[in-house]
Amino acid sequence: MVKVKVYSTPTCPWCKKTKEFLKENSIPYQDVNVAGDQKAAEEMFKKSGQMGVPVTDIDGQIVVGFDKPKLKELLKIGG
């Protein structure tokens, strides 16, 4: 089972889209709210070099933004 972590904020529409996509495809994930967690925000920045959300970590591979084709590829979702 792949480990998926989504760094997000409660008000980010692309974060919601990313999490909806994962739910629709029955992919379990850990949601990390970086809005109120400075340590998580720093962890996200170290991994991605980005301060923008969403940042999705799939077994150590980083996807910045809601990049559906990249998410499908890394999660091996057909279609």
Image (cartoon, grey):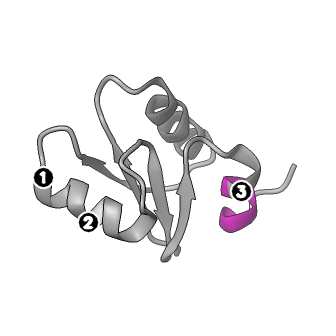
Tell me which amino acid carries mark 2: Glu
Q: Position of residue 33 (x, y in %)?
A: 24, 43
Which residue corresponds to the image point at 75% horizontal and 62% vertical from the top-left? 73
User: Badge 2 is on which residue?
Assistant: 43
Closest to the camera, between mark 1 and mark 3, is 1
Mark 3 nearby-residue class (10 Å; few <14, some 14–19, many ≥20) = few
Which residue corresponds to the image point at 53% horizontal and 65% vertical from the top-left? 62
The one nearer the camera, 12 or 74, is: 12
Cα distance between the residues tagged 1 and 2 = 9 Å
Which residue corresponds to the image point at 55% horizontal and 44% vertical from the top-left? 65
User: Badge 3 is on which residue?
Assistant: 70
Dominant SS of magenta comes to helix
Which stretch appears magenta? 71-76
Which mark, by number, is residue 38?
A: 1
Which residue corresponds to the image point at 23% horizontal and 46% vertical from the top-left? 34
Establish if 75 lies above or below 50. Answer: below
Mark 1 nearby-residue class (10 Å; few <14, some 14–19, many ≥20) = few
Examine the structure image and report whether residue 74 is included in the region drawn in magenta: yes
The one nearer the camera, 21 or 37, is: 37
Residue 42: quadrant of the picture: bottom left
